[in-house]
Amino acid sequence: MADLESENSKAAAAEEPSDTPKFAQIPGIDERRKTPRKAFFVMGQIALPQRGGMAVRYLDISTGGVGLVSDLNIPAKTRVHLKFTIMMADSSLYPFVVQAEVAHSTFSSLRRGFVIGLIFLNPTDELLMTIKQYIAS
């Protein structure tokens, strides 16, 4: 029985994407995020200071921020504007523009770009409520 359990856990570990941070693969290491997040596979935009807007692929969302993939490596602490639309289970659409700050940026060959984590700066109550409803759905 123990062999079956260890085989199942090895198979699950093998399915981890190669760009998953090493600390996330080590048992006993806690997740650093303080808010729950949910997959959020949509196209949107990011506007950089003195560069303008460019298309990005969003990966996940929480009330604290978002993860996305960009062709451009954006340094930590850079302030940007994000533009995306949240589609709820009933197909209603909620477009948002919000200021954010880059927390980290790591190149991922698996995702073919830079995986960037951003923290929302002064999100509106409407955005936070919509994200909570999206996560709960």
Image: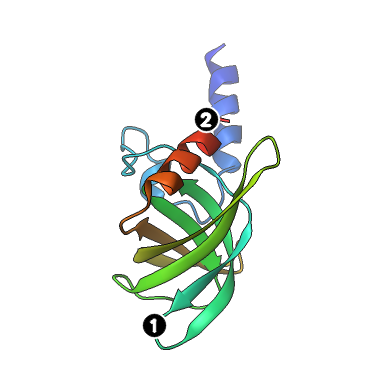
Q: Nearer the viewer, residue 24 or 87?
A: 87
117 vs 83, left or right, is left
- Identify the element where label 2 is drawn: helix
Q: Residue furthest bottom?
A: 50
Q: Which mark is residue 136?
A: 2
- Looking at the rendered structure, the kind of residue marked 1 is Pro
* Quarter of the rendering containing residue 4: top right
Question: What residue do we see at 49% from left, 83% from top?
Answer: 52
Q: Which residue is mark 1?
A: 49
> Is 21 placed left or right of 95 in the picture?
left
Question: Residue 12, how many percent across, how many down?
Answer: 58, 34
Q: Secondary structure at mark 1?
A: loop
Task: Identify the amino acid type marked 2.
Answer: Ala
Q: Position of residue 81 (x, y in %)?
A: 43, 69
Q: Toward the viewer: 24 or 39? A: 39
Seen as rendered, the residue at the extreme top is: 1
Residue shown at 52% from the left, 61% from the top: 68
Name the residue rendered at 66%, 43% in the picture: 92
User: 84 or 4, which is in the foreground?
Assistant: 84
Q: Is residue 131 above or below residue 7?
A: below
Q: Spatial distance from mark 1 to mark 2, Cα to Cα?
A: 34 Å
Do the CB atoms of the residues marked 1 and 2 lie less than 8 Å apart?
A: no
